Amino acid sequence: MSFPDTRSVRICVILPLAGFLCLFLGSAFPQTKPSSTSFAALSKRADEARDADRLKEAVALYTRALALQPKWKEGWWSLGTILYDQNSYPAAARAFRRLVFYDPNNGTAHLMLALCQYQVGLDDSAIENIQAARKLGIKKDEQLEHVLQYHEGMLLLRKGRYEDAIEAMQLLVKQGVHNDDLDAALGMGALLIRPKDAPADGTVGRQVLLRAGQAEAYGLLKKRDEGKKTYVDLAQEFPAFPNIHYAYGRFLLAFDELDEGIAQFQQEIKNNPTHIRARMRIAAADYRINSTAGIPYAQEVVKLQPSYPFGHYLLGLLYLDSGDIRRSIPQLETAVHMVPREAQFQFALGSAYAKAGRKEDAAHARAAFVRLQGNNRSSGGETANGQPLHLDMPTGPPLSREQRKQK
């Protein structure tokens, strides 16, 4: 499979529209009885024009027929797909929005609406509709499922949710999809690049991006040696490329190579002294083996970016694990104040209160944890300066030292 240009994902890539679409429409939508002879005639002529590829005429006829019978779901689908195929994304979005209104449980309609919204930059709405499509289910078609996974990943990249984007696209890799579009997307996730800032085709930066994406794909397939060699070569050839050492360090941590991973993060910090994520990765890795060693890195995160709640949370955890309860509590309280609905923050704070002998405060925090548990995953929202809220961080109740070493 090859993905189409992300700027204009044509519907012909998603569904073979000609004969198959008509068969699909018959099973996907219950037939609606025409309300009048005029509607029956218009709808018949519209379908004939569509099938004969007289698309301009078909659009006009569908529009007239839908004015007479607004609940005609097959008509909204046909109109929307024609407009999408013509790159008329705002008009197609209006058609699919009406279809979703009349058929809210149609996951494929939600997906098509999301693809239109993706094209016009309505990313939040597009993510909501892709999530609805995933929840409701879409037409059983492998190509269509690939389109959903790829565009979900791209939308998350646009939001700066890099780890979530890689996770969204991992099924594509595991299903055997391999092409430059997917490699580029995985590379953007690894190198912390939003699509609008991606290096142009034909540049050295584009080759770095694609090779980093290939290394990530190896990692997702558990092919450690192939991925590590790719990253070693990249780090040697382009040692100053932004986030190359960070990406390599993250790859190493996924295979529990902590010391080598930390060394790569330290090199990234040398290249970029204000690198928040590299410091967070080091501190989180140290939390597994030596919390005291991680404290300076978490302190630097809080100093560099005091509005970042996970920085305060991790620093509080490190203090707590090192036995410094007095310094732990203010950091955890700050994290809870910033994001009061994050269950893991409440649990850690409750543990700190308990160790400090503040039984009533501990009970209150742990009650909040129980109430919030099950909604523990961060939304991926961003702070005011654009730093994503959530990294691959210690989540859930703090683990014992032995449990952390085994992870």
Image (cartoon, rainbow, N blue to C red):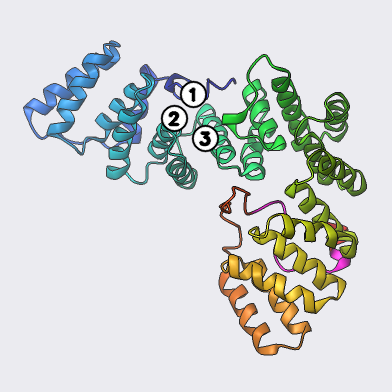
Q: What is the magenta range?
A: 390-403
Q: Amino acid at mark 2?
A: Gln
Gap between marks 3 and 2, in whole Å? Answer: 14 Å
Q: Residues within 10 Å of mark 2 (few under 14, many from 20)?
A: many
**CA neighbours of label 1 inside 10 A, class few (<14), some (14 to 19), many (20+):** few
Give the residue at x 12% y 28%: 39
CB within 8 Å, label 3 to label 2: no
Vertical side of 391 occupied by 38: above or below? above
Q: Position of residue 63 (x, y in %)?
A: 19, 26
Number of callouts: 3
Instruction: Kindly identify which residue carries mark 3.
Output: 148
Residue 119 got which mark?
2
Res 30 quadrant in image: top left
Q: Is residue 117 left or right of residue 346?
A: left
Residue at the farthest left position: 37
Residue on which the image places disc 1:
7
Q: Name the foreground residue: 44 vs 151.
A: 151
Is residue 403 in view?
yes
Q: Please report contact status of discs 1 and 2: CB closer than 8 Å, yes or no.
A: yes
Q: Position of residue 178 (x, y in %)?
A: 67, 24
Tell me the mark number nearer the camera, choosing from 3 and 2.
2
**Which mark is first along the chain, 2 or 1?**
1
Q: In the image, 32: left or right of 209?
A: left
Magenta region includes residue 54: no
Residue 133: % across, % down? 45, 42
- Between the residue at mark 3 and the residue at mark 1, the CA separation in whole angstroms equals 15 Å
Q: Element at badge 1?
A: loop
Q: Main secondary structure of the magenta part?
A: loop
Above or below, 384 against 218 in this view is below
Q: Residue 90 vs residue 359: left or right?
A: left
Work out whether residue 399 can be spotted: no
From mark 1 to mark 2, how far is it between C-alphas? 6 Å
